[in-house]
Amino acid sequence: MTHQRCTRGPQLPAAKPERGRPGKHTRAVLGAAGICLCLVTACTSDSSNPAPARTAATGPAAARAAPAASVGRAYEFLTQMLNLHNPAGTADIADLPTLPQSYLGGVPGIQHYTVSAIYDDAVVLDAYLAMHTGWGDVRAERIGNALVNAWTHSRRLFDDYAPGGLGHPGDARIAGHASSTGDVAWAGLALAQLYAATGISKYLDAAVAIGNWIQANCASDRGPGGYTGGYDSSGQRITWKSTEHNIDVFAFFRLLARLTDEPVWQDRAQHARRFIVAMWDWPPGLFDIGTLANGVTTNDVTQAEDVNSWSYLALRDPGYAASIGWDVRNLDSHAGRFNGVSVSTCDRGGVWFEGTAHLADALETLGRPGDVRQAARYLSDIRYAQAHGPNADGRGIIASSENGLTDCQGDFLYASLHTGTTAWYILAAKAIDPLSDVPLIDQPVR
């Protein structure tokens, strides 16, 4: 059976954990001053060279500056990955359509795993838009133009492409032939966000076409309805349904409804929402991960972080807000010096830093005093990993504290620097919700 993915880790053989445990599964609105500091660190150059060493500072001013400086260094990493495969002599070409490499170093580096995952690309695009600057918009457009060209190449998006320049549709190099509904929806959502920010019609045209592809290939009336999982790498239709995928589709179609004023997109968004709420499990107050291959029977073999944080970011419904607290209580994870949450209940042996950022963002969105304090702790945990994690470079964020952390649905996570994790950290640090019905350009910057 095709695995129902809770995460989007690199598809590598399972690695042994760095620190074994008995029974462990084998297995990856800033203020004005803050904005200025972020722009100084992130925008002065597109160079992929490491950032210069910084002199330590102390006192209240340093405490306020530390998060902004950390976000600035995170942007440096994203820009390094964006330019990593530029042809010689083109590193400073600001308008070169490009897909950034997703992972750097660690096990994926050893195994020469150098793909660009469209989910990661979408979140990186969102992070650049979250800067609310022309500098960020230009880099978002580089990724957006590459995604448009990838779509034009096949009239379908695939999960993974070779990284680097994609200036024309014919430059697209498909690295993996699966088309996961959620990944495709994230790419379409990012293009819709880019249209909202720039007004350039080709981004909306591509987003609408991608939405129509999802509707034509993945819409289902079986059981609770919703959308099936897409196509696997052999071209076989996936018949299970993922709650996480339907959250992605709901957010994407709802934004299309807002941007196009076409009621059909709201109808389609509600079709995804009906599936999402059908997966609500009370008690204990969480969302199940989806269905089995028959598209009807609930898959409750494990419980995952992302569906419980993303559901609130997308729905903003207090009736389902208990899912955030469920994540905090049940996925809390400590691995040596590292703290945060794990990917799922089946493997609590490491910290999943992308999921920790998801949850921080959801807690900030929920906004109660205790939630905001917990979000600040999670963001501090991620900053610690940025500086001290395995394979850390002081800029990017590793996907996981351990090699081989698993969701027990076929994905593994590694202690490798990851664009998706880094971009989610930026979004959470800025309290930006990429799944909201409010476009990123209209969300206030913290």
Image: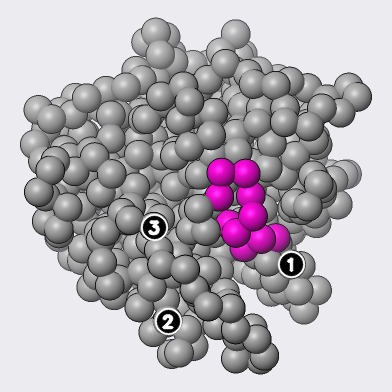
382 within the magenta span: yes
Question: What SS does tag 2 mark?
Answer: helix
Q: Amino acid at mark 3?
A: Pro
Residue that numbered label 3 is attached to? 50
Labelled disc at residue 341: none
Within 10 Å of disc 2 (Cα), the crowding (few <14, some 14-19, many 20+) is many
Of residues 87 and 209, the one nearer the viewer is 87
Residue that numbered label 2 is attached to? 37
Which residue is drawn at the image coordinates 9% and 48% (left, top)?
89
Within 10 Å of disc 1 (Cα), the crowding (few <14, some 14-19, many 20+) is some
Q: From mark 1 to mark 2, how far is it between C-alphas?
A: 22 Å
Note whether residue 12 is visible.
Answer: yes
Question: What SS does tag 1 mark?
Answer: helix
Q: Where residue 403 appears, x then y in whole percent?
A: 65, 31
Which residue is drawn at the image coordinates 61% and 13% (left, top)?
294
Which residue is drawn at the image coordinates 31% and 54% (left, top)?
48
Please report whichever mark, 1 or 2, sits nearer to the chain's N-terminal start.
Answer: 2
Q: Where residue 223 appears, x then y in whole percent?
A: 62, 24
The residue range painted magenta reads 381-392
Q: Does 142 sit left or right of 57 as displayed?
A: left
Q: Amino acid at mark 2?
A: Leu
Of residues 27 and 91, the one nearer the viewer is 91
Q: From mark 2 to mark 3, how far is it between C-alphas?
A: 18 Å
Majority secondary structure of the magenta segment?
A: helix
Please report whichever mark, 2 or 3, sits nearer to the chain's N-terminal start.
Answer: 2
Residue 299 quadrant: top right
